[in-house]
Image (cartoon, rainbow, N blue to C red):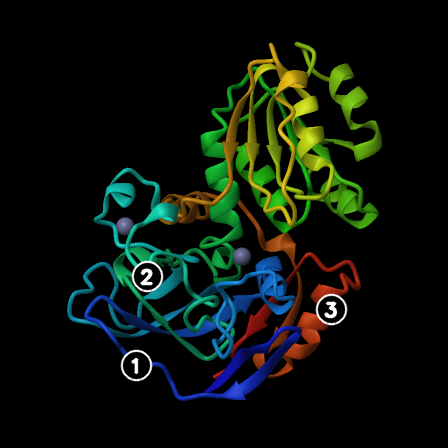
């Protein structure tokens, strides 16, 4: 089968590999129908994910059809259409039982697919702990609608959940990339009084303006002043930092009102400074990143009910055999790309 493979730093290639087989009774094999490219794939390509193993098939955003299941798998069966979760988790350990599945203490737990083990930019994928890693897609939900459920939408959903948003809140979201927009959609479900999105890219600003006209938009340079003018208590009640740029962490806490919650979803390239003397008396609560991707069934229900729609994010689509082109476009952010879908045509 075709599999997009991490060869070495700076190089991915479409290779022919054997079809995966079950390795444990908890595994399932999924025939992938639709996949996508994530910024984390680019991080692997550029060598900034040290635990990524050369030779593995990349890709961790995908949906497909269950082809085969191990004896211990009970929640999905052959022929089921499923969303694949980016995280592998056992469901049994101390952390899993409390919903902190990102911290699953199983040796295979965490972000394994498309990083430490073969992922889904391929025709088939082996999913460990399939009872946790796969979620059936309701009939009324298309592959396109379900494509981001296991990764960036799970992230946005989790970020909105842990931010404890109420109807009186002014919520500031920093960054309107794909994960920022998924976060925005999930924050919208909480119906806060105001949502302000801070973004610098003109194309992303245009995208938000076009699709979510009720959202207030600002740029990083003017963000602090804008938030002061458009909030009730001297800053945002909730700040969700999804940008991960050099100065966006400091922007996040500076825009927060005293006693606000600042949720850091972003993954930074460099250490960030927490200047405690400067923040003294502001009494902020920080919550930090690493999605607990255990709400996929609930997210799929919300999609089925028409409450979340991420399909506008899919701006481009390529068949698997042209995935090199898809990467080039995504990496260079050409042609107004937000997300690329990778189709498997059987
Ligand atoms: Zn991802
Ligand atoms: Zn666990």
Q: Residues within 10 Å of mark 2 (few under 14, many from 20)?
A: some
Q: Earlier in the sequence, mark 3 or mark 1?
A: 1
- Spot the residue most to the left: 71
Tell me how far mark 2 sits from mark 1, CA to CA.
17 Å
Q: Which residue is mark 2?
A: 108
Tell me how far mark 3 sits from mark 1, CA to CA.
33 Å
Q: Earlier in the sequence, mark 2 or mark 3?
A: 2
On residue 21, the disc is 1
On residue 329, the disc is 3
Tell me how far mark 2 sits from mark 3, CA to CA.
32 Å
Task: Give the image location of residue 95, x and y in percent.
Answer: 29, 42
- Spot the residue most to the front: 277
Q: Earlier in the sequence, mark 2 or mark 1?
A: 1
Indicate left or right for 231 with 117 as reference: right
Task: Give the image location of residue 11, x and y in percent.
Answer: 64, 77
**Callout 1 secondary element:** loop
Task: Give the image location of residue 283, x and y in percent.
Answer: 56, 14
């Amino acid at each position: 089968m075709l599999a997009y493979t991490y060869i070495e730093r700076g190089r991915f290639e479409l290779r022919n590999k054997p079809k995966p087989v079950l390795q444990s009774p908890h595994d399932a094999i999924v025939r992938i129908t639709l996949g996508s490219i994530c910024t984390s794939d680019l991080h692997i390509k550029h060598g900034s994910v040290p635990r990524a193993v050369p030779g593995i098939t990349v890709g961790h955003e995908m949906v497909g059809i269950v082809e085969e299941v191990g004896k211990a798998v009970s929640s999905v069966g052959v022929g089921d259409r499923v969303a694949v979760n980016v995280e592998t988790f056992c469901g049994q350990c101390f952390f899993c039982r409390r919903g902190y599945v990102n911290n699953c203490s199983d040796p295979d737990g965490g972000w394994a697919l498309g990083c430490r083990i073969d992922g889904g930019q391929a025709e088939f994928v082996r999913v460990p702990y399939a009872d946790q890693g796969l979620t059936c897609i309701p009939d009324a939900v298309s592959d396109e609608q379900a494509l981001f459920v296991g990764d960036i939408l799970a992230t946005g959903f989790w970020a909105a959940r842990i931010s404890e948003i109420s109807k009186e809140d002014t919520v500031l979201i920093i960054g309107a990339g794909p994960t920022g927009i998924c976060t925005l959609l999930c924050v919208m479900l909480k119906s806060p009084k105001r949502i302000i999105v801070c973004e610098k890219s003109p194309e992303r600003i245009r995208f938000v303006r076009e699709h979510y006209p009720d959202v207030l938009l600002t740029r990083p340079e003017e963000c602090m002043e804008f938030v002061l003018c458009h909030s009730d208590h001297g800053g945002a009640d909730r700040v969700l930092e999804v940008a991960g740029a050099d100065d966006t962490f400091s922007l996040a806490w500076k825009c927060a009102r005293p006693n606000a919650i600042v949720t850091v979803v972003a993954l930074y390239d460099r250490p960030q400074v927490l200047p405690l003397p400067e923040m003294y008396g502001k009494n902020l609560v920080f919550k930090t990143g690493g999605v607990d991707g255990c709400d996929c069934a609930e997210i799929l229900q919300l999609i089925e009910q028409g409450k979340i729609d991420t399909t506008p994010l899919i701006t481009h689509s390529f068949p698997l055999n042209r995935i090199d082109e898809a990467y080039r476009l995504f990496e260079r952010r050409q042609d107004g790309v937000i997300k690329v879908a990778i189709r498997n045509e059987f």
